[in-house]
Image (tube, rainbow, N blue to C red):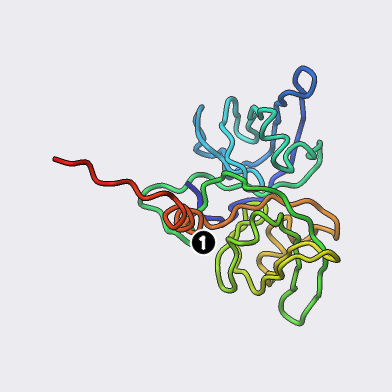
Amino acid sequence: MFTGIVEERGEVVAVEPGHEGASARLTLRGPRVVSDARHGDSIAVNGCCLTVVEHDTETFTVDVMGVTLDATSIGALEPGSPVNLERAVPAAGRLGGHLVQGHVDGTGRVEERTPGEHWEVVRISVPARLARYLAPQGSITVDGVSLTVVSVHDGSAEAPSSFTVSLIPTTLAETTLGTATVGSPVNLEVDVIAKYVERLRTAPAVAEESR
């Protein structure tokens, strides 16, 4: 489990494609997140929970399966790409953002950036199947960053569904969202609580077993 509070902006060191693109092995630089790393630990890379298989004092290596490459923007990473990194939160840690599983629900794209005096408003497209989980002042994880939804725009024939977030100077300076250009793909994870609420409302009722 994560919180969406990025600990470090790391960098991809190497990408080793697997057979016929069915997998990949990534080596990433992140001295802070590997300072206490052990084999098998979970580290969120741009919001995607990945498992450490090798590490030293500066870098760590993860294996990425084909389904993850297909469902996230991880497959687009190349040597030199910046990445947002976060270690799994300890049970006694502070929940500074919101409950983040590191299970990416889909990808969106940066559609528009509007600079302000002390913040920047960013509009991001979202797959229609995920838009129903978004609500103003609700939580969304974008490339591993816990953000508050400002507004939600339902899709139409002319434009896809989208939402806006406001990025404060700290987020702009310390995460990859500060340099993400219009058209950049981003990983999205909606609030897990919203998914559970939907499931409880739509699942067929099960009669209590007779005793």
Give the answer, above or below, for where 107 lies relative to 24.
Answer: below
Q: Picture quarter containing residue 56? A: top right
Q: Residue at x 80, y 39 (%)?
A: 76
Q: Relative to the observer, which residue lies in front, 211 or 38?
A: 211
Neighbour class for label 1 at 10 Å: few (<14), some, many (≥20)? some
Q: Name the element at disc 1.
A: loop
> Which residue is nearer to you in this view: 49 or 96?
49
Whether 11 is drawn above or below 185: the answer is above
Residue 171 image offset from top left, x and y in percent: 67, 64
Give how far across and how far down residue 21 sits, in percent.
Answer: 78, 24
The reply to whether residue 167 is in sight is no
> Most extreme residue toward the top, as rendered?
19
Decide: is 88 above or below 60: below
Out of 2 and 27, give the one closest to the viewer.
2
**Circle count:** 1
Residue at the image point whose x is 64% and y is 29% from the top: 61
Q: Is residue 118 visible?
A: yes
Split into 4 quadrants, where in the image is the C terminus?
top left
Residue visible at 80% across and 76% down? 115
Q: Residue furthest left?
A: 211
In the picture provided, is 141 more to the left or to the right than 195?
Answer: right
Residue wearing tag 1? 97
208 relative to 200 in the view: left or right: left
Which residue type does callout 1 highlight?
Gly
